[in-house]
Image (spheres, rainbow, N blue to C red):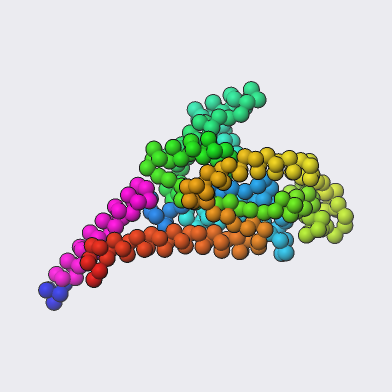
Amino acid sequence: MGAIEDQVQKLHTIVESLEARIKSLEERKFGSGSKTADEVRMILIGPPGAASSVMLTTRFRPAGKGTQAPKIKEKFNCCHLATGDMLRSQVAKKTPLGREAKKIMDQGGLVSDDIVIGMIKEELNTNPECKGGFILDGFPRTVPQAEGLDAMLQERNQKLQHAVELQIDDALLVARITGRLVHPASGRSYHKIFNPPKKDMTDDITGEPLVQRSDDNADALKKRLDTYHKQTTPVVGYYQKTGIWKAIDASQQPGQVWKSLLDIFDGDAKKASGTGSAILDKLTGGR
């Protein structure tokens, strides 16, 4: 028995050594500190309003960034960095970057790319949730921002894995958003077509009037979409050249959108698994 136990222990030692060597080689390929398929580093690209372009009804549910990002966060235990939320948080916490940003905003200026990238870096350094990776939402919007983000990640010996664009036809998006109705006091939402109130422009529960948000009109939305496309088209081209861009049809049911995202992540897992298997074959001579 002693001889068998010795052999088993030796095999365990060999396996542990091989796993350590595989991890080292994977880190060299995917970036130090990376857990390959277990970690996610990605950006979500999508038009304004896509996240909430349809109401929470049994027939139509949101399929955009605001719906998918929390699901990715839960799967990977990573952080979801929405630039607007991040900016407000830094200002509220009165961090050096937050104070600098507030000063600029109070003067009516635009927060610089360097400040935003600095805030992202700060989150990656200090936010425990970011140990599992990150999802960037709302940034980058321009090619210089994308280049600045890549440079910051390169300093950390990391790189983006995916730039996922959630695509939806402008006309469909306008039709969905311009039909939104809201009960101001409760936040209850309706839709003129997909989820109409029982009585026109009246909340089902209180009987109080419903309103349409001022920025939910077709003209305002079309202007926002025009700006979005002008900004985003070069960014999409930038990530297409790097080979990490993927497009998903966001007009589908949310379950199908989520399946498309999982297919992308499954590709990572297979790639990492294949890398590990190939390394093992080389180290063991294919035995």
Q: Is residue 65 left or right of residue 18?
A: right
- Range of magenta residues: 6-32
Q: Nearer the viewer, residue 123 or 284?
A: 284
Q: Is residue 254 left or right of residue 221?
A: left
Residue at 49% x, 51% y: name it: 244
Residue at 88% x, 55% y: name it: 200
Q: Can residue 120 be seen here? A: no
Q: Nearer the viewer, residue 49 or 125?
A: 49
Q: Residue furthest bottom?
A: 1
Quarter of the view holding residue 9: bottom left
Q: Nearer the viewer, residue 258 or 208?
A: 258
Work out which quarter of the rendered image holds the N terminus and state it.
Answer: bottom left
The x, y position of residue 193, in whole percent, is 81, 58
Q: Can residue 19 be seen here? A: yes
Q: Is residue 197 magenta?
A: no
Q: Residue furthest top?
A: 107
Residue at 75% x, 52% y: name it: 171
Residue at 43% x, 53% y: name it: 39
Quarter of the view holding residue 57: bottom right
